[in-house]
Amino acid sequence: MSDQLPPTPHGAEGPPPWPPEANATPAPPPGYPTAPPGSTVPPGSPAPQAPNPAQPTPAKSRKLGIPLAVAAMVLAIGIVIAALLLPDSTSPTVGLPESAAVTMLTPTTVTVNDLAHQPIETTGDSLFTTRDPVGMPAPTITGRSFDDSAVRIDGTEPTVVVVMAHWCPHCQAEIPRIVDAYRAGKLPDGVRVIGVATANTTERGNFPPAAWLDRESWPFAVMVDDEDGTAMHALGVSGFPTIVAIGADGTVRAHTSGENELSGLQATWNAALGAASN
């Protein structure tokens, strides 16, 4: 169950009747030890001479040599077994199944502060002009992140845009799902990912959005929407989260509203690449 969008600020017209999906929140505003160099071998029997009480007799030497020889043999066997069992230092992933390999996340790009809004500029038609924006040219959106660095959404490369609100419970479930899938290498490479933090307000929970995204280790760029939700409306958002896939030709390849399971995320990433989903 979801509610419709409230009227846009400053008297702008609201979106067309495009209800979000059931799971969408409506958008308001080393080493083993080595063996010793050698082993002590009992000396040979000396020439017959008078026994010296300070030295062991030949009989005692033979009794002493037996346990030493056994110990040396046990040590040698242990070294051979260790050499066979220890992994080769040149193969750090030996012993791990292929599925255990992971894609390491880069450090989060989010600068933590209380920033709620940044200026936004757009060119091109809003995706609200049609019920199905797939196939439309994506608008170009220019804005800034929490650290005031420039962020731009355009059609120059395969791109996935994730539109989120800090107070939205479905976004709070979706963002870690995306991060986990990316960490596990389960999302296709070659796709630029941009988050859009919108509808930010101190009057809703989980504020500020920068702290939330930092806690989730969000590794991608983030554009901060303005107070009017200009970026959100340009992307045709009717509910949160919304994910928009843009192909390298600048057209919208997929547009989803609501939470996605892993298969849905993979399909959206593949759509941006122009590849068919399995």
Image (tube, helix red, strand yellow):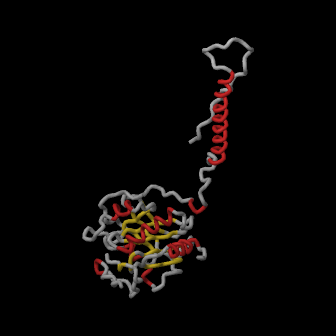
Residue 21 position, x and y percent, is 42, 83
* Residue situated in front as seen by the camera: 10 or 83: 83
Name the quarter where the N terminus is drawn. Answer: bottom left
Tell me which corner region of the image, top left, top right, bottom left or bottom right, holds residue 17.
Answer: bottom left
- View extreme (left): residue: 203
Q: Is residue 229 above or below residue 67?
A: below
Q: Is residue 42 left or right of residue 213?
A: right
In this view of the protein, can residue 38 be seen by the observer? no
Q: Residue at x 62, y 47 (%)?
A: 86
Q: Residue at x 63, y 41 (%)?
A: 78
Residue 172 position, x and y percent, is 37, 70
Residue 191 position, x and y percent, is 54, 66
- View extreme (top): residue: 50
Residue 56 position, x and y percent, is 63, 20
In this view of the protein, can residue 138 be seen by the observer? yes
Q: Is residue 216 left or right of residue 191?
A: left
Q: How many marks?
A: 0
Q: Residue at x 35, y 71 (%)?
A: 165
* Residue situated in front as seen by the camera: 99 or 243: 99
- View extreme (right): residue: 47
Name the quarter where the C terminus is drawn. Answer: bottom right
* Residue situated in front as seen by the camera: 45 or 133: 45
